[in-house]
Image (spheres, rainbow, N blue to C red):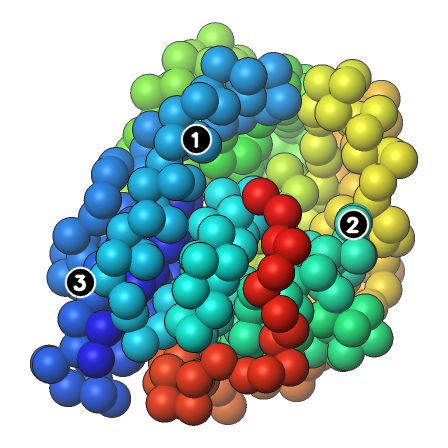
Amino acid sequence: MKVFLVATEESGDRLGAALMHALRAMHGNDIVFRGVGGFEMAAAGLPSLFRIDELAIVGLAAIPSRLPLILSRIRQAAKAALAERPDVMVIIDSPDFTHRVARRVRRANPSIPIVDYVSPSVWAWRPGRARAMRRYIDHVLGLLPFEPEVHRKLGGPPCTYVGHPLVEQVDELRPNATEAARRASAPPILLILPGSRKGEIRRLIGPFERTVERVAKDIWPLDVVIPTTSHLADAVLRTTAHWPLRPQIAVKREERRAAFRTARAALAKSGTVTLELAIAGVPMVTAYKVSRLEAAIARRLIKVPSAILANLVLGENVVPEFIQEDCTPDKLSAALLPLFADGPARNRQLDAFRRLDTIMEIGKTEPARHAAEIVLETARRGRLPAAGVAARVTN
C-alpha cells in the first residue's frame, strides 16, 4: 500500500509523523510513504521531496517574494503524487498550499482518493470553501469537535472528529499533587507566550514586557517563565535581556510542560496555545497584533465571535482577548491581575476548562489511530462519487 502525504509546517509534520506510525502499526511494514514533510515525518520513514522550512512565510508582505518558489513546489508535489499513483493521498493543514496540490491531483487523476487532515477554518472565514472542497476532498479529519456539524451545514465533504493531538498529552499538561501545590504557592508563576514566529514575538514582546512590569507592582515576588522552542530561544533571549524582571526561558519539552503544570496564570498570543493552557487548567489573558493591512482584511473576513480557540471549543467567551489597539499594557494587566486570586475571574475560567474533558472526549479517543482508520478505509473504498466531478477545478 502506498500513501502520499503533504505537510508543510511543523504542526502538520508532527501530525503526519503520528499518522504514519499509526498506519504502520495497523497495516504492517509493507506500507510505503511518499510526499512532503519535515524532520519528524522523515524520521518516521518519509523521503521528503524538499525541505519544508523554505516555505515559511510570516505576514502578507513576505508573500510576493516567495510566490514563485511556492508555486513551483505546488507543481512539484502534485506531479510527484501523480507519478506515484498512491492508494490514498493525505494533505495535512496549510490549506493555501496543500489544497492547491489536491486540486491539481484531482483534476489530472480523479481516481486517487484524497483525505484532508485538519479542516480549514471554514467556520471562521470564507465558509464557501467547505462546499468547494467536495470537488477534490473525499473525507475531512477534524481536530475540533464542532467541525463535523459545520461541514454538514455548509455542504462540505464528510467530516469526522478524530480528536486534537492535545487530548493525548493530558498527563504532560496537568499537575500532580506536588505541582498543584506549587501552582498555589508563592511566588506565583506567570507564563508569557508571545508566539511561535519571530514576527509575532516582535509585535507582542513590548506590550507583554510592560504588562509584566505592571503586574509585578501588585504581585511580588513573581516568577516569569517564557516557554519557547530551540529555534526561537536566541530571539527571545535578546528581546528580554533588558527586562527588569528577568524571565526564565524554558526550551526543552519537559521544561515547557513543567511550566504549564505549575503556572498560576498566563499571558499568551491567541492560537492553539490557548487550548493547551485550558487543558492544563491555567487561566489566561490573550492578545494579538498584526499589521494594519492584515487587521483590516481580518475584520472584513472573520465571522466568529472570538479568535480564541479555547473559547470556540467551549462555546462561550470565557477567556478575555485584546486585539490590535486594545492590546495595551493597561488593559492586559487589568485583566491579568484578578487571575492570581481565588475569585470570580479565575474560577469562571477554571469551571469552563473542566468541561473540556467531555467536549473533546479526552481519554476516549486516540487521534492518530482514529485518523489512520479513516485513511485506510478511504484507501480501501476508493474515491466517493459524492466528492463531485473534477472538471473545472481552479488552481
In the image, what residue occupies the spot 17% across and 71% down?
32
Q: Position of residue 20 (x, y in %)?
A: 26, 70
Residue in view at x 39 percent, y 19 percent = 235
**Can residue 17 be seen at all in this image of the molecule?**
no
Secondary structure category for the residue under label 2: loop
* Residue 112, position as x, y percentages in the image: 40, 71
The spot of residue 51 in percent (x, y) is: 25, 37
The answer to which quarter of the image holds residue 6 is: bottom left
Q: Is 204 displayed left or right of 153 in the figure?
A: left
**Within-10-Å neighbours for mark 2: few <14, some 14–19, many 20+:** few
Query: Between residues 72 and 334, which one lies in front from this camera angle?
Result: 72
Callout 3 touching callout 1 (CB < 8 Å): no
For label 3, the SS is loop
Identify the residue position indicated by label 1 in the image: 70
Real-space Cα distance between discs 3 and 1? Answer: 25 Å
Sequence-wise, which precedes: disc 2 or disc 1? 1
The residue where tag 2 is placed is: 126
In the foreground, 297 or 267? 297
User: Residue, x 85% and y 53% (percent of image)?
Assistant: 304
Q: Quadrant of the N terminus?
A: bottom left
Q: Image height check: is 215 above or below 64? A: below
Depicted 253 relative to depicted 208: above or below: below
What SS does tag 1 mark? helix
Residue at left offset 71%, top offset 18%: 291
Which residue was labeled with disc 3?
Answer: 44
Q: Amino acid at mark 2?
A: Arg
Gap between marks 3 and 2 measured at Cα: 34 Å
**Amino acid carrying mark 3 in the image:** Ala
Give the mark nearer the N terminus: 3 vs 1: 3
